[in-house]
Amino acid sequence: MAIDTQARSEERRPRSTSGGGYHAGRERPAGGWELWTWLFMRVSGVLLLLLAVGHILIMHVFDGGVGRVNFGFVAARWGNPLWRTWDWALLSLALVHGVNGLRVIVQDYVKWPAIRFAVNMFFYVVTFTLFVLGTVIVFTFDPSKWRPA
Amino acid sequence: MAKQKSDIGTIYKGSPGQWSWLAHRITGVAVILFLFAHVVDTAVIGWGPEAYNRVLRVYHNWGVRLLELGLVAAVMYHAINGVKIMIIDFWPASTRHYKALSLASTGLFLGGMIPITWIMGHEILKLAGVL
């Protein structure tokens, strides 16, 4: 029983490089694509520390939070290219970081290959669609369309 | 024999860090699901002020604001615990101080949530008509 458990997790998580049996996150994969996605999670995580935490404090906590957000607020904010760039970087990194997290979780809980494929595909399509939608809006939004000139 | 939970990867075989591992997953899933909805609600701005302001009216509700507080907590937890994960990943010797690291990250999270809850709670109570 215990041996079976061991064998399964060895196959899924090839070789730990961290010591002592202490795990906080996913064990570091031995190599290949999985190592790159593992590394991406850490690198994007560092960037999101600024982008996501900054965004959430500015937009949801300080200075009235979401209560002050409306069309005019966003129009003024996106008047500054810094915020458009920030929001686009946040959109891209958060979506990819999130969808990869979902993929790892699906790998753990969805065992049947066809269902796993379908669930993953669903998340990929949603992510890609939202990436395109968000990108188009962030870069093409022009408030002057609705302002009496 | 029946399958153990660890057989399908639901727990981390009870190693230290199991609970933060679980909390990291739950907060991560919560945040990405919100993000899916949030990209759509923000994109509505491309359809003009009337449409966008109508969508934002969803947030002018104390129940939704309470969920928003949960979202902020989820992001803060995921961020702080993520730093802990990276410290352990890139500096394996730190596992010797695992307990101190866990206490520090939990303390930082809870300590940070006090002023955040104070600030957001004030708005929530105002919307609920209590203040």
Image (cartoon, coloured by chain):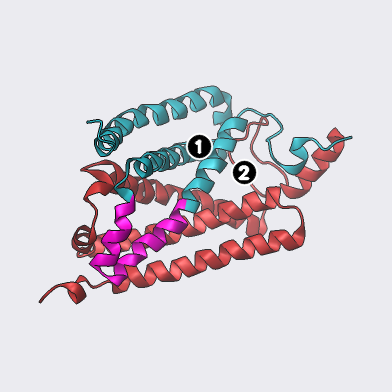
Chain colours: A red, B cyan
Please, which residue is most extreme toward the left here?
A: A149
Please, which residue is most extreme toward the front here?
A: B129
The percent coordinates of residue A142 (x first, y second) are: 23, 73
Looking at the rendered structure, the secondary structure element under dot 2 is loop
**Quadrant in the picture for the C terminus of chain B:** top left
- The residue tagged 2 is A26
Report whether A53 appears left or right of B15. left
- The residue tagged 1 is B87
User: Magenta region: which residues?
Assistant: B34-58
Query: Residue sitting at 23 percent across and 61 percent down?
Result: A71
What subunit carries mark 2?
Answer: A
Q: Which mark is residue B66?
A: none
Q: Quadrant of residue A72?
A: bottom left
Report whether B95 appears left or right of A57. right
Looking at the rendered structure, the secondary structure element under dot 1 is helix
Q: Nearer the viewer, residue A86 or B3?
A: B3
The percent coordinates of residue B51 (x first, y second) are: 29, 66
Report whether A59 appears left or right of A144. right
Q: Quadrant of residue A2?
A: top right
The percent coordinates of residue B11 (x first, y second) are: 68, 36
Dot 1 alpha-carbon crowd within 10 angstroms: few under 14, some 14 to 19, many 20 or more = some
Q: Nearer the viewer, mark 1 or mark 2?
A: 2
Q: Amino acid at mark 2?
A: Arg
- Do discs 1 and 2 belong to a common subunit? no
**For residue B55: magenta?**
yes
**Quadrant in the picture for the N terminus of chain B:** top right
| Magenta portion: prevailing SS class | helix
What subunit carries mark 1?
Answer: B
Query: Residue sitting at 21 percent across and 70 percent down?
Result: A143
The percent coordinates of residue B101 (x first, y second) are: 50, 27
Report whether B55 appears left or right of B84. left
Q: Nearer the viewer, residue B129 or A137?
A: B129
